[in-house]
C-alpha cells in the first residue's frame, strides 16, 4: 500500500476504538475499508437506530471525503434521499467538502461530524417524511452553500467575489473590502477570503467554472 493508503488504514484502525461495531478490512486490490454498524443515540444517549455501512478509501483522501455506503438496502439510491445512483452518500456540497477537508480531516472526525449527522437526518426523514436543514439538489444546493459562506445572496456578486479571491493576494487588513461594502476588509470578508483560499486555486477555479456554466455568466 502507498503512503495515503497506509494513512487511511491507520485512521480506520483508530476509528474502530471510537466505533467498536466497525471493522477494518482489506480488499483483494489491497485497499482498506471499514465495514459494520453505526449506532445512533438520542439526547439521553439511548440508542434509537442503527445503520449497516461500508466506508471506502477515495482516490484523493484526505483531500476528499471517504465513500460511504449503506449495505442493507434500507435507503433508496435516489438523489432525493441524498444518495447517488451507485449508493454512496451525498453528504454535503462540493465546496463544503473542500473547505472541511482543507481544515484537516481524520476518519474518526469525519464519522463523528459528517456521517452520524447525515444518518440522524436519514432516520428523521424516514419517520417524518422530510429532512431537517436540507440543501437543495444540484446547482441550487451549491449556490445555497456559497450564499451561506459569503453572506451574499446575489449570484452575480457571488461570482465576482469568487473571481476576486481567485485572482488576488490577501488584502491588507486596513484595506476596504473587495465586496464593495465600504467596510474594512478585516471586519468584512477576511474570514471568508481565508476559508475559500484554503481550498486551493484549482478547486476554487472549478467552482467558478461551474457557476459560469450553469448560470451562463
Image (cartoon, helix red, strand yellow):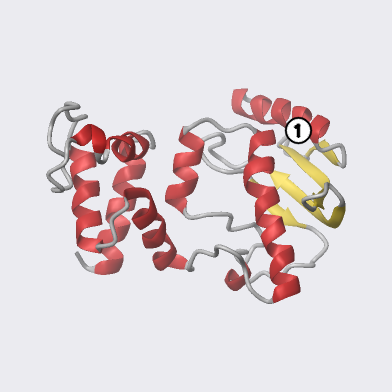
Side of 175 where 88 appears, left or right: right
Give above or below for 16 relative to 45.
above
Quadrant placement of the C terminus: bottom left
Dividing the picture into quadrants, the one containing residue 166 is top left
Q: Can residue 1 be seen in this snapshot?
A: no
Q: Residue at x 44, y 41 (%)?
A: 99
Quadrant placement of the N terminus: top right
Side of 80 where 19 appears, left or right: right
Q: Residue at x 67, y 69 (%)?
A: 77
- Between residues 85 and 145, which one lies in front from this camera angle? 145
Find residue 122 and report its horizontal and vertical position in percent: 70, 64
Side of 129 where 209 appears, left or right: left
Q: Residue at x 53, y 30 (%)?
A: 104
Q: Could you say whether the residue bearing mark 1 is in a helix, strand or loop?
A: helix
Q: Residue at x 38, y 54 (%)?
A: 148
Give above or below for 68 relative to 62.
below
The residue positioned farthest toward the top in the image shown: 3
Q: Badge 1: how crowded within 10 Å, few (<14), some, or many (20+)?
A: many
Find residue 132 and report its horizontal and vertical position in percent: 60, 65
The residue positioned farthest toward the bottom in the image shown: 129
Q: Can residue 41 be seen in this snapshot?
A: yes
- Give the labeled residue for mark 1: 15
Dividing the picture into quadrants, the one containing residue 51 is bottom right
Count the numbered circles shown: 1
- Between residues 68 and 110, which one lies in front from this camera angle? 110
Amino acid at each position: 500500500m502507498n503512503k495515503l493508503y497506509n494513512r487511511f488504514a491507520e485512521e480506520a484502525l483508530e476509528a474502530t476504538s471510537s466505533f467498536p461495531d466497525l471493522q477494518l478490512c482489506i480488499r483483494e486490490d489491497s485497499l482498506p475499508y471499514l465495514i459494520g454498524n453505526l449506532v445512533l443515540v438520542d439526547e439521553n444517549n439511548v440508542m434509537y437506530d442503527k445503520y449497516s455501512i461500508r466506508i471506502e478509501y477515495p482516490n484523493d483522501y484526505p483531500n476528499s471525503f471517504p465513500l460511504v455506503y449503506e449495505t442493507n438496502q434500507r435507503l433508496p439510491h435516489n438523489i432525493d434521499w441524498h444518495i447517488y445512483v451507485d449508493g454512496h452518500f451525498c453528504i454535503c456540497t462540493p465546496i463544503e467538502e473542500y473547505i472541511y477537508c482543507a481544515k484537516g480531516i481524520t476518519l474518526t472526525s469525519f464519522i463523528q461530524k459528517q456521517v452520524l449527522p447525515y444518518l440522524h437526518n436519514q432516520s428523521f426523514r424516514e419517520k417524518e417524511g422530510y429532512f431537517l436543514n436540507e440543501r437543495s439538489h444540484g446547482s441550487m444546493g451549491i449556490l445555497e452553500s456559497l450564499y451561506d459562506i459569503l453572506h451574499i445572496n446575489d449570484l452575480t456578486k457571488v461570482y465576482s467575489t469568487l473571481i476576486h479571491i481567485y485572482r488576488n493576494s490577501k488584502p491588507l487588513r486596513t484595506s476596504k473590502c473587495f465586496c464593495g461594502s465600504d467596510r474594512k476588509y478585516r471586519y468584512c470578508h477576511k474570514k471568508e477570503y481565508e476559508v475559500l483560499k484554503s481550498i486551493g486555486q484549482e478547486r476554487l477555479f472549478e467552482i467558478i467554472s461551474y457557476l459560469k456554466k450553469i448560470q451562463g455568466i
